[in-house]
Amino acid sequence: PKLSAAGRTALTMFGLTRRIAGCGLKAAGAAARRPDQLRQAVPALAPCQLEARRGYRHWWRVLPEDFELNTESMPKDVKTLMAANPDSLGFIDSYWYWRIRAESTIMDPENLPKKSYKQLCRDMGLTIVNEAAEHILGIIELYEYLKSSPFIGPFGTIENPVLIPAIHTERVVGCSGGTGDSEHVPLWFRCREGFLYRCGECDQIFMLVRVMYELPENEEINPIDKDVKDVYDFSLLEKGSEVWNTGGMVNWPLAYDALNGTIYGGMARDALNDQRAIGE
């Protein structure tokens, strides 16, 4: 019987589909009969590549806000806190005093460029660079270096002993002699103040020297300059909050929480727990 054009087209497509399916089944059967050849086609991973994976966890960088106290710990009466003497406050109260005072200074762009160096340091709670501060910082850096570094210098004698710096009256010392043939196994001993010590192996002489720093009586390491204003103006906090926390946006959450008694600009602090007073 004669087929129409549509019938011939359908018969041609059916034959093409059958041939494609047959080729696929033949390939699958051949692969099943030759599993070794199929496995060789896949590249094997070397043992070093398996060990190339990182065996440690990547820790993110520490940020300043990781060490901040929560707003719940802020005192109830912030106005009384900012009028108090910062030297007489406890740890938490002092933290909030200097944090509020420092942020009030930074968030006041109108008066910030007009402040002197000493005034800015005091408002930020920083130490003013002076001779006493530089001296004690230099001693601390020297001791930290000598604490962890081996001594390299001339051989210690009675006239010129090896000086051992320490902040206490005694320190453990290890002598390894000189260099080359003069070197020996480390010999440990306790070096005390007021005596000369001789190494039992190489006869080297050591003497302890205490690293101390004392201020004269009635003198402070961080004195407040007479030109520095050390009284906090509470209106800076109120004006700053009015400038930065308007239009439905809380751009300075610390000031908003301090004035409104909230936590991160949300619920009241007393709603979670009884808010503590200054000194508690």
Image (cartoon, rainbow, N blue to C red):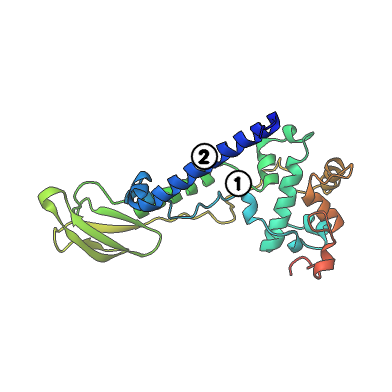
Residue in the image at 27% along x and 58% along y = 207
| Circle on res. 127 | 1
Q: Nearer the viewer, residue 83 or 59?
A: 59
Residue furthest out toward the front: 1
Residue drawn at x 81%, y 58% is 78
Residue 51 visible in image: no
Residues under labels 1 and 2: Cα distance?
88 Å
Q: Earlier in the sequence, mark 1 or mark 2?
A: 2
Please, which residue is most extreme toward the right here? Answer: 247
Q: Residues within 10 Å of mark 2 (few under 14, many from 20)?
A: few
- Percent of width and height locating residue 136: 48, 49
| Residue 206, above or below 251 | below
Q: Report helix, strand or loop for mark 1.
A: loop
Q: Quadrant of residue 201?
A: bottom left
Q: Quadrant of the N terminus?
A: top right
Quadrant occupied by the C terminus: bottom right
The amino acid type of the residue labelled 1 equals Thr
Residue 119, quarter of the rendered image: top right
SS state under label 2: helix
The residue pinned by badge 2 equals 19
Left or right? Give the position of 171 relative to 94: left
- How many marks on residues? 2
Instruction: Please give the name of the residue rendered at 76% of the width and 41% of the height, measured from the top-left corner.
Output: 107
**Nearest to viewer (mark 1 / mark 2):** 2
Q: Which mark is residue 62?
A: none
Side (left or right) of 202 relative to 12: left
